[in-house]
Amino acid sequence: MCKKEELYLKLELIGFRVTNNGKNIVKSEVDIEKTLVEALYHIDSDGRLLSLMLSWMKIHGAHVIADKFFKEYSDSKEYLGESPWFSAICAYMYSLKDHRFKKGVAKLKKAHFFGNRDQSSLIKLKGAVDFFKNIGVLVPNSALRLRDQDVLSVEELVKINHQYRNRYIFGANWRAEIITSIQNGAHNPNQVAKLLGIARSRVGIVFKEYMQVREFI
């Protein structure tokens, strides 16, 4: 698991305002879904990260590739274990009517308190967040602070993040990811497939079509 400072830099590069309020962000490439999954494993040790995650997903969640988010989490849990926040984030997106995340919503076998500490008294006083409580993740209502200004706008993020910009143009799908890989220097379908961890059959047609028109893009 990456260090907090490294995670914050990555989060900044996908549009979180976590270190310098979005000023002087260096144009660089980090993977959106990988970074979001890394953040899941820091939520319980970082009180504000959950609110930031939800604020980001509210604004930018439509441009997350849900299947890739599931894949990155599946890969991560093999060595980091399960995170209750994967299902929690999916539950939040499903509450926003984004049905792509429905299959990621699963009720926990054992209730999980936000911050890994029993907050029963506070929840009794303030209540718990409904869409989390329904899956067994217990978060006091007072713990959330969702604010649009805590993340970059779509217009701002398009300017600094190449991967996100391609999704805005081509859609939140593997086609956009294949094109991003080609633009980042991948030379053939096999290389793209290996980089993305997907079958070559999903790459071939898109690679051919892009190469035919790339001089016009």
Image (spheres, helix red, strand yellow):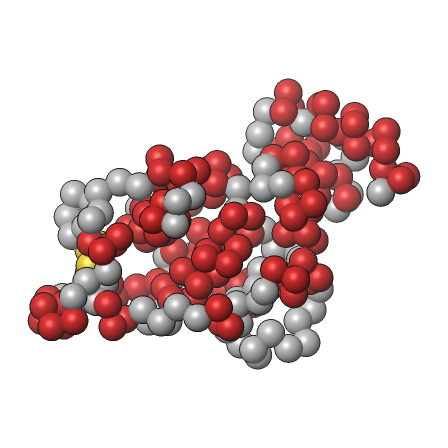
Judging depth in this view, the residue of 193 and 133 nearest the camera is: 133
* Above or below for 114 versus 134: below
Residue 214 pos. (x, y %): 85, 37
Q: Quadrant of the C terminus?
A: top right
On the picture, is 6 further left or further right than 24? Answer: left
Residue drawn at x 25%, y 54% as measured from the top left: 132
* Above or below for 6 versus 68: below
| Residue 90 appears in the rendering | no
As drawn, which residue projects farthest toward the front? 97
Number of numbered labels in the structure image: 0
* Above or below for 137 versus 172: below
| Residue 212 appears in the rendering | yes
Residue 86 pos. (x, y %): 35, 48
Residue drawn at x 55%, y 52% as measured from the top left: 32
On the picture, is 202 further left or further right than 186? Answer: left
Residue 182 pos. (x, y %): 75, 39
Which of the 4 image quadrants contains residue 52? bottom left
As drawn, which residue projects farthest toward the right? 215
Q: Quadrant of the N terminus?
A: bottom left
Residue 40 pos. (x, y %): 38, 56
Residue drawn at x 22%, y 47% as measured from the top left: 135
Judging depth in this view, the residue of 73 and 14 nearest the camera is: 14
Residue drawn at x 35%, y 35% as measured from the top left: 103
Which of the 4 image quadrants contains residue 140? bottom left
